[in-house]
Amino acid sequence: MNHQQLRPSQFITTYGPGSIIETRSGPVVISTVDNVFSDNNLALADFEIRDARLITSPLLNGAGIVRIPVNAEIRREEDYPLYRSEQLPYWSLCVEHRILYLNRRRCPQCPPATVTFDREKAGREAIRFVRVCTNGHLDDVDWHYVVHNGPRCANQPDYYRWQGGGGSLRNVTIQCPNCGAPPVNFGTAYSRDWPCSERYPERGPRPNQPACAAPARIVQRGAANLRLPELVSALTIPPLASRLTTVLQDTRIMTLCGMLLSRNMLTETEFRQSLGYVQPPLSQAVLQFLQQCSWAEIEQAIPQVIGTASGAGRSLKEDEFNSLRYAATYGAPPVSAPQIGAPPLFEVRLSELRRFYGPARRYLLRIVPVSRLRMVMVQLGYRRLDPPNALLVPVSFQSGDRAWYPGVELFGEGIFLDLEDADLDLSGTRFPSWLQSYNSTPTDETLHPVHVWWHTFSHRLLRALSIDSGYSSASIRERVFLHRQTNGPTRGGLLLYTVQPGGDGTLGGLLALARNFDQVIAAALRDVNSCSNDPLCEEAFPSGINGAACYSCLLASETSCEQRNIHLDRVLLSENLP
C-alpha cells in the first residue's frame, strides 16, 4: 500500500503540498490541500480554524484557515489514503545491475517478475536526485537531456548504464546503451545548471511548454533546502481567549452578525432564530453551546470579535507582547469568571509570578508562567534552495470568493520573560556592529541589537530548560518580542512554550520550573563565555547573519527557532549579562 501516516501538525510545520514523503512503496509528492475536501465531499466550514487577529493580518488579508482532516473524524479506515500523491522521481536505480531505468517499467537485466511491473521494488529503488529551481519548481531529472547534453537519441532508450560509485559523484558516469554518445560524468552534471520544466507537481501534470527563466539544479530529494516551509503563527490573547469568542469567530456566524448589525436587527430573537438557517448548517454542539450562553454574554462578545476582525494592519507580535506584559501586571483573566466554556485559552496566575536577578545582577527578570495558551500556526507557502532569493510558492487554494490556507491549532503552556525594573542597555563591542546591520535594513526588526540579545538569551535557555522540564529542546519553542518606541527605549521579551494538538494541552513541565527559574538562568549563562569551537566561534564578527554562534554553543533545532538560527551572537550576550 503506497501510503504514509502524518500528524496534522507535521503537515504544517515540516511537510505540506509540494513536499516529498517517503512511503513503503517509494517517495511521493503531496498534492494541494483542496483535493482532500473535494475527493471526500467535506465542507470547509466544518474544519475552519478561527482566529480573527491572524485572518485580518496583512499576511492572510482575510483568507480563511482550515485544519487538516484525519481519517478517524471522517470515518475512514486507518490505512485509507486520504490525500492524493504522485510518485516522484520517475526513475529508479537497480543497484545489482547498475541500471538507471524508468520505474514504470523494470530493470531490463532483472529476471521477469510474477507481475508485469513490480511497483514496490521500483519505488524502493527510486533514484535519490530531483531537479529544482529557486522559483519553486520541482521535477524529475531529465536524464535523456543529461546523458545526451540535449535532445535524446533517435532510439529513445528507457534505461541507461550507471557505472562507478563510491563516496563521490565524480566517480559515477552515465551512458546511453543505444548510441555512441560519450559517458557523462555525473559529478559535473550535478554542479551545473539545467533547463527548468516549470512544474509544480502538487498541481498536476507538466505544463506544455517550459518557460521558467530560472536555472534548475540537481539536488538530493532528502536535502534540507529542497522545501523550506514559510510559517506564521499567532497567540490567542484577550479579549478573544474564551470559548464563546472562539465560536463566534466562525465565518458563518460573523457574516450573520454583520448582516444583522447592518440592518439594525441584532436582537436575541433574531440572532438565535437565524442560527438555524446558516449554510452550511452549524453543528449541534455549537448550537447547543450558544443556546446555553446568556444573551448578555453574546451581546458583549460580538463587538469584541467584529472589532478585532476589522483591525487589519496591526502587528500580531506587538499585540501579544502588550497583552503578556499586561497579564504579568494584572493577571489574565483578572478575575476568574464562571462562564460557560471555562477555562480560558490564555491564563496567567499572578500568584505564580517570580522575579530573579541574573548573574551580573544588572536587571530584575520577571518570570511569568502562562498556564494555558493557544497557538494557531499557518503554512503560507514554501521556498526552495536559497531562502533570501527564492520565490515564495503559496499553498493556499481558492474556494468560492475566498482563499484558504492549511493550519493547525495547538494548546499548551509557556513561560514569559521580560525586564521589570529597567530597560536593556547594550554597551558591548558587538553593539555598534549589530546596530549598523539594523540601520542598513531597518524593516528587519530581528537585526536590532535588542532582538539579537533576547534571541540569543532564548537559545541558551532552551538548552537549560530541556534538562529539567521533561521536554526535549526540540519540543520547546521560542517567540521573541521587540517593541520600538518613537521617543523611548526599545523593549524586548520572550515566550518559551510547548504546545501540542488537542484541548488538554501539555502537562506542566515548564510551569513547574518557574519557582526555581534562577537556577535555569544560572545554568544557561554559566559557560556562555566558552565554546568547544573557540577561538573560531568567538572571533566570528557579526556579518548581518550571525556573530559567535555554532551548533556547539547556540544553534537550536528547526522546530524551536522561529528565525532559522540566524541573527544570534553569544558574545553580545556575554558582554551584557543580565
Image (cartoon, helix red, strand yellow):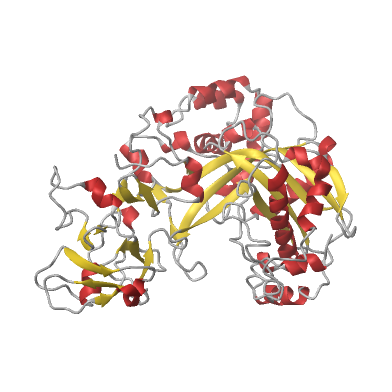
Q: Residue lying furthest left in this view?
A: 155
User: Residue 138 lies in what quarter of the image?
Assistant: bottom left
Residue 418 seen in this snapshot: no
Left or right placement of residue 41 versus residue 239 in this view: left
> In the picture, which quadrant includes the N terminus?
top left
Residue 525: x percent and y percent?
79, 58
Comparing 510 with 404, the one in front is 510
Q: At 32% from the left edge and 75% from the top edge, which residue is drawn?
A: 189
Residue 265 position, x and y percent, is 57, 31
* Apparent side of residue 274 relative to residue 102 in the rendered image (left or right): right
**Does residue 522 sit above or below 152 in this rendering?**
above
* Residue 516, image quadrant: top right
Please state which of residues 554 and 95 is positioned toward the viewer in this rendering. Answer: 95
Image spot of residue 387 (x, y percent): 50, 66
341 relative position to 95: left or right: right
Image position, residue 72 (x, y; %): 42, 29
